[in-house]
Amino acid sequence: MAQEEKEPMEKMPDETAQEPEVKEQDAPHEETGAEKQAEEAAAAEEAPKEETPEEGSQSSEEAPETDAEETGEKGGFWKRGKKKEDKEKAALKEQNAELEDRVRRQMAEFDNFRRRTEKEKEQMFSMGERNVLEKLLPVIDNFERGLQAIPEEEKGGAIANGMDMIYRQLLKQMESLGVKPIECIGEDFNADLHNAVMQVDSEEFESGKVAQELQKGYLYHDSVLRHSMVAVVK
């Protein structure tokens, strides 16, 4: 009995000794798995934390690129708009210059037309007035012949004075219209003013001088209305 009791006593420590060994062997395996799980969990938690700043950094880095692209697009659009605006301004300036040149030409043409028409009117008026004055010259000639034909005893009479007054009034009106007689007696012969119808001998005047006035000539505004009919010294 004693031996039988000792044997189980000896076995008990063996079992107890074996159990802690199993625990000691199992414990490290459980701790190792837990540590691995903890490490994996920590790695999983750390991974998004690391990715987040990377994504943020990428987005922050990409943001300036997009801003630069947008700025470049805006700058290019602004440049294109400015070029288009400059072209439109240049076209408007050219069109404005053409219009101004056309207006200046038309104004010059109108001014020339106005001057030409005024000159034509003056010429037409002058021609009409000239024709009327030419028709009055024979009347003046007749007044002069009539005054010369009055006898000496009648020159102070009423009829002679009346004729002389009418003659002087007519000459005054002719002068106001630009008509004046050509002075020719004793002057050199001038074909532009005088019409020589004969040659005479003269002791008073030299050769080539006008000795006699057969018909009085007149000027109209410095142009010959009628040539003087004269006799020239040989």
Image (spheres, rainbow, N blue to C red):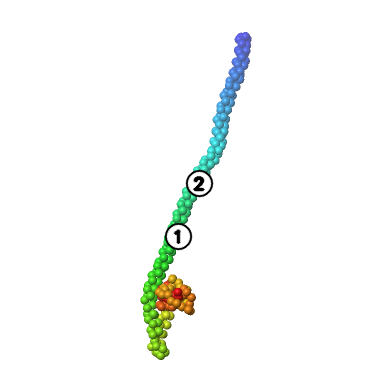
Residue 91 visible, this orientation: yes
Residue 138 lies in quadrant? bottom left
Q: Nearer the viewer, mark 1 or mark 2?
A: 1
Residue named by callout 1: 104
Q: Secondary structure at mark 1?
A: helix
Residue 220 visible, this orientation: no
Disc 1 or 2, which lies upstream in sequence?
2
Figure check: 42 above or below 86: above
Q: Residue at x 62, y 12 (%)?
A: 10
Q: Residue at x 62, y 15 (%)?
A: 13
Q: In the image shown, does 151 or 220 lie closer to the viewer?
A: 151
Q: Position of residue 39 (x, y in %)?
A: 58, 28
Residue named by callout 2: 79
Q: Residue at x 56, y 37 (%)?
A: 57
Q: Residue at x 40, y 84 (%)?
A: 148
Q: Position of residue 100 (x, y in %)?
A: 45, 58
